[in-house]
Image (spheres, rainbow, N blue to C red):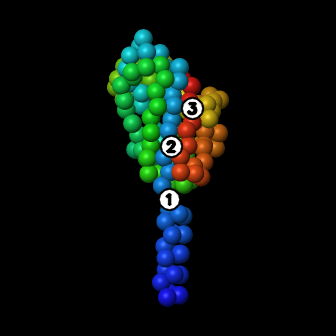
Amino acid sequence: MKFTLLTIILTLLNVDLNAQCNLKVKVENIDVSKKGSLKIGLFNESGFLQDDKAIAGKYINISSNSMIIEFQQLKKGNYAVAVFHDHIQDKKLTKNTFGYPIEPYAFSRNAKGFMGPPSFEDASIQLTEKGKTITIKL
């Protein structure tokens, strides 16, 4: 009996420790007159802003000036979100000849970089609960 009760308690604790989280990202200030799509990437620190190392990504057609995108079944931890409005619809952030982006972009915590993108630390959010919603303004 004691072994069974202990097993049940440990199993319940393990389930709680590995609970999955959902993240809702509300993107605001989308210029619907330019049409196109939103490309959203979810990153951990080691793969920050590397497309091929994104934890998850979505590419969706713009339907309004404010949209909600949801990422599900994430582990608790630190993440950063990058989003851009792909006017050209080539699935990459278009830049001018000087390397400056010409399509609107933004990061979680509305982090801003200086002479480049923000650091992961500046853009990071912590998922510690079952659900979280953040807002990013383009």
Provide the residue designation for mark 1: 19
Residue density around tag 3, few if under 14, some if 14–19, many if 20 or more, within 10 Å:
some
Q: Amino acid at mark 2?
A: Leu
Provide the residue designation for mark 2: 23
Q: Is residue 47 visible?
A: no
State left or right for residue 102 relative to residue 35: right
Provide the residue designation for mark 3: 135
Question: Where residue 45 sits in the image (x, y, percent)?
Answer: 55, 48
Residue density around tag 2, few if under 14, some if 14–19, many if 20 or more, within 10 Å:
many
Q: Amino acid at mark 3?
A: Thr
Label 1 sits on a secondary structure element that is loop
Q: State which tag comes first along the sequence, 3 or 2.
A: 2
Observer-nearest of 44 and 100:
44
Above/below status of 123 relative to 62 = below
Kindly identify the residue that appears in the image at 56 percent across and 25 percent down: 137
Q: Are marks 3 and 2 in contact (CB under 8 Å)?
A: no
